[in-house]
Amino acid sequence: MSGLEMNPLKSEIFFGGYNDTEAAELSETAGFKRGIFPTRYLGLPLNPGKLTLSILQPFLDRITAALHSWTVKYLLFAGKIILISSVVYGMVNFWIDSLCAAFLWRNGTSSARGARVAWVDICKPKQEGGLGIRHLEDFETVFRLKRVWNFFIIRFIRNGFWLTPDSPRFSATIRSMLDLRPMLSNYMHCLIGDRAAASFWYDCWTSLGPLIEVAGEGGPRSMRVRKSASVCDAARDGSWRLPPARSPAIQQIQKCSHLHVSVFSNVEEKNILRSLIRL
């Protein structure tokens, strides 16, 4: 235990699914003031619903004010890069690339029209010809992928994430996470152990990548291996239980799979999320 205690004078408690009477009683019992959304956490807007422009506007005003305060000092181009990389980006976690692009090229924040180089190229690493500035859209995607990794891949049954169909019943957050499945599969690699947990169709355990992408949606039926099957389900006593190949794609899968039958061990599989971006 750290020995730290919450300070009721500096803390607030937030409720979900309670009426006003219940929330008031619980707040009084806990000894904390009841918090109301939207609020701020570490200087950033925090809201249980979708972040709207009106909620983000005070934060964007801070960014604009910081850029304008430096604009009047007539920074050189190199100075603007330092400002964007260190000072401004240290304040943000939202899409404000357009403001920074306008500041870099037009010495303002209203428009980046007339920019000599596309912002996406400016944000490339220096060794690739860019200036090493973070591209916030890519930065946000990395955090979304990491959230999917923590929420579905680590804490819950992995196959459920790949098999769950999108539904309007899901929250916008869950649906956005499900939309990342094609991208996430490109960055995952499975080190095969005892085959009990690795997904036959969705984990990247062969050099072909996820086998569902090679065989298509009809692959499970053609190979008589259900979509939710593990690698272990497709093998018995050290050999595969696969029917004869009826297409070039299935034949390719069978050839590649036979190369992996000798590397199985009693070690548990590990899914590895390859580096996505230099943070």
Image (cartoon, rainbow, N blue to C red):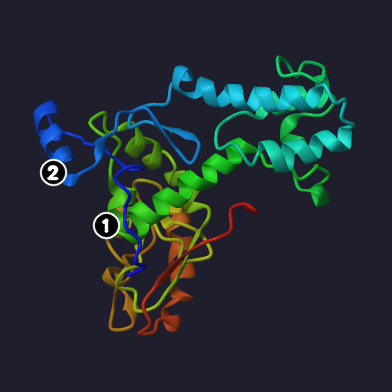
**Res. 77 in view:** yes
Name the residue tied to disc 2: 29
Residue reaching furthest front? 9
**On the rendered structure, is 192 left or right of 35?**
right
Q: Which residue is nearer to you in this view: 75 or 177?
A: 75
**On the rendered structure, is 258 left or right of 170?**
right
Q: Which residue is at a point 75% across and 24% down the rendered structure image?
A: 69
Tag 1: amino acid: Ser
Disc 2, SS = helix
State the quadrant of the N terminus: bottom left
Viewer-nearest of labels 1 and 2?
2
Q: Position of residue 88 (x, y in %)?
A: 68, 36
Q: Which residue is nearer to you in this view: 142 or 4?
A: 4
Q: Residues within 10 Å of mark 1 (few under 14, many from 20)?
A: some
Tag 2: amino acid: Thr
Q: Which residue is at a point 9% across and 29% down the rendered structure image?
A: 21
- Quadrant housing residue 211: bottom left
Residue 275, above or below 192? above
Q: Could you tell me how far apart the alpha carbons at marks 1 and 2 are, in whole angstroms?
A: 47 Å
Name the residue tied to disc 1: 228
Q: Position of residue 114 (x, y in %)?
A: 82, 17
Q: Which residue is nearer to you in this view: 136 or 35?
A: 35
